[in-house]
Image (tube, grey):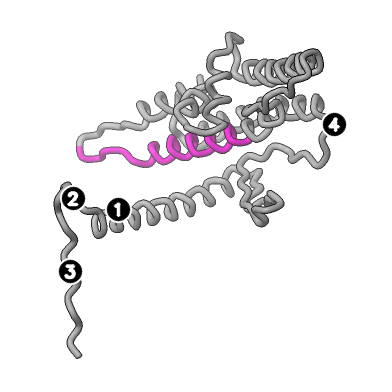
């Protein structure tokens, strides 16, 4: 079975994000190393060298170095996000393998698998093998990156799927809501999250349909008065 990887496609898709991970993904995608893990490692070193050069220039010029928007330390959370996104891609491919058009005998799971990362099979077992191979790659990369940042304490390990939520905005304190290492547990959590996201999207659509003023000169209709 010629299953490959979700990682490359996930990073390319992340380049369209208008956030820090999107900016990092663009740096990774433009690196010329042949393998994604090496591209990520190179970008981490590039950012470290860029910061060091800025500090030296600041000492020489007496002008404080500008704050970097992307830092070497950000690469750790980037790798976790790549792993999370790979889980979502794996779920999509696995679900496509269950949805065949029995009326005409067509199976569209192959095209979904290819779009998600040149995956040769949408069978659940094969999807799991591909995803866990990706995890092994990113986990070794993440461990190496942590060793390069031994000046930091309490570094999180890489999880198959992990999420945090802010519990103290003033102090910027975050707490894990998910720390998953099992493939089946991950699928169960993503199923629940998919339902939540679908409900949220439907609510936003309903709010827009009910409150948006369509047309430049249209005025909202006055609410009916309730009978006394």
Sequence-wise, the earlier of marks 1 and 2 is 1
123 or 44, which is in the foreground? 44
User: Which badge, 1 or 4, comes first in the chain's sequence?
Assistant: 4
Seen in the picture, residue 38 relative to 206 is either above or below; the reply is: above
Q: Main secondary structure of the magenta part?
A: helix
187 with respect to 67 (left or right): left
Measure the alpha-carbon separation of dots 3 and 2: 15 Å
> What number is the disc on residue 214?
2
Q: Which residue is mark 4?
A: 151
Asked if marks 1 and 2 touch (Cβ < 8 Å), the reply is: no
Work out whether mark 4 precedes mark 2 in sequence or the reverse, and give the earlier one. Answer: 4
From the viewer's perspective, is the residue at label 3 or at label 2 nearer? 3
Q: Residue furthest bottom?
A: 228
Residue 132 spot, x, y in % from top left: 61, 32
Label 2 CA crowd tier, 10 Å (few <14, some 14–19, many 20+): few
Stretch in magenta: 80-103
């Amino acid at each position: 079975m010629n299953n490959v990887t979700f990682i490359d496609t996930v990073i390319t898709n992340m380049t369209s994000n208008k956030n820090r991970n999107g900016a990092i993904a663009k740096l990774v995608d433009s690196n010329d190393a042949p393998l994604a893990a090496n591209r990520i490692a190179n970008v981490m070193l590039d950012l470290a060298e860029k910061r060091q050069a800025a500090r030296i220039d600041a000492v020489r010029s007496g002008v404080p170095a500008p704050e970097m928007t992307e830092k070497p330390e950000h690469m750790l959370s980037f790798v976790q996000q790549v792993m999370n996104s790979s889980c979502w891609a794996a779920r999509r491919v696995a679900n496509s393998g269950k949805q065949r058009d029995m009326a005409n005998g067509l199976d569209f799971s192959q095209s979904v698998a290819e779009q998600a990362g040149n995956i040769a099979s949408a069978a659940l077992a094969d999807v799991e093998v591909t995803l866990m191979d990706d995890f092994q790659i990113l986990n070794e990369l993440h461990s190496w990156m942590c060793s390069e940042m031994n000046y930091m304490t309490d570094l999180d390990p890489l999880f198959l799927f992990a999420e945090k939520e802010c519990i103290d905005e003033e102090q910027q304190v975050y707490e894990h809501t998910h720390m998953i290492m099992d493939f089946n547990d991950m699928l169960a959590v993503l199923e629940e999250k998919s339902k939540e996201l679908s409900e949220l999207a439907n609510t936003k659509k309903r709010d827009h349909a009910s409150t948006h003023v369509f047309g430049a000169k249209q005025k909202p209709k006055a609410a009916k008065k309730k009978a006394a």
